[in-house]
Amino acid sequence: MFEAAVAGYFVAISLIAAIGAQNAFVLRQGIRREHVGWVVLVCAASDALLIAAGVAGFGAVSQTVPWLGDAMLWVGVAFLLVYGALRFRAAWLGGEALVAASASPVALQRVIMTVLLLTWANPHVYLDTVVLIGAISAQYAPHGLAFGIGASAASASFFTALGYGARLLAPVMARPRSWVILEVFVGLTMWVIAAALAFG
């Protein structure tokens, strides 16, 4: 059970850490020190709901369709390999500096609507949480719940660290090279997970 929870944590953290519009928005809000708690809460709660749907859905479906677990395992491996390659490509092309704009404060309602849109309107979120995490959780049956809890904990800890640690990261993440290093790290992590799934 503990192994499943740890695996869920690291699988989720590698997927969530990939640079995207949502993470950039959380980081930007953290740098601005504006509505950070609400932004973190919306992101973590949304991920928890999607992860729960993925884990519960795949657990139920895999009992009815025994071969689905193996099929989705290899789909997951292929996705991780491709997504990891995209991260390496992004690193090769170079990073972009993230500097918070010195604009006037934005209303809480507008910030929440923006983060909800960046989360729920992003197809990659469903692919990462519902499909990929759900499929990998089936490999840890009957401890899928522990896997899902570990994955949800990864989301909560990542967004909390990103939002509240942004002030410390601001000088570092303003340099494009920092984003390149992060992209390489995420790509390597995804390839390691893919290898572990394929040969494990």
Image (cartoon, rainbow, N blue to C red):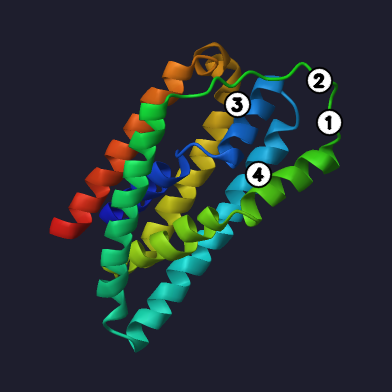
| Mark 1 residue element | loop
| Mark 4 residue element | helix
Locate the C terminus and report the quarter of the image it occupies.
bottom left
In contact (CB < 8 Å): disc 4 and disc 2: no
Which residue is painted at 64% across and 56% down in the image? 120
Q: Is residue 166 above or below residue 144?
A: above
Which residue is painted at 28% across and 66% down in the image? 73
Q: Residue 163 lies in what quarter of the image?
A: top right
| Mark 3 residue element | helix
Q: Which residue is mark 1?
A: 106
Q: Which residue is mark 4?
A: 41
> What whole-number distance in Å separates the C-alpha atoms at marks 1 and 4?
18 Å
Mark found first going from the N terminus, 3 or 4: 4
Residue 64 picture location, percent across and down: 36, 88
Q: Amino acid at mark 3?
A: Tyr
Mark found first going from the N terminus, 1 or 4: 4
> What whole-number distance in Å separates the C-alpha atoms at marks 2 and 3?
20 Å
Neighbourhood count class around disc 3 (C-alpha, 10 Å): few under 14, some 14–19, many 20 upward? some
Mark found first going from the N terminus, 4 or 2: 4
Q: Amino acid at mark 2?
A: Ala
Mark found first going from the N terminus, 2 or 3: 2
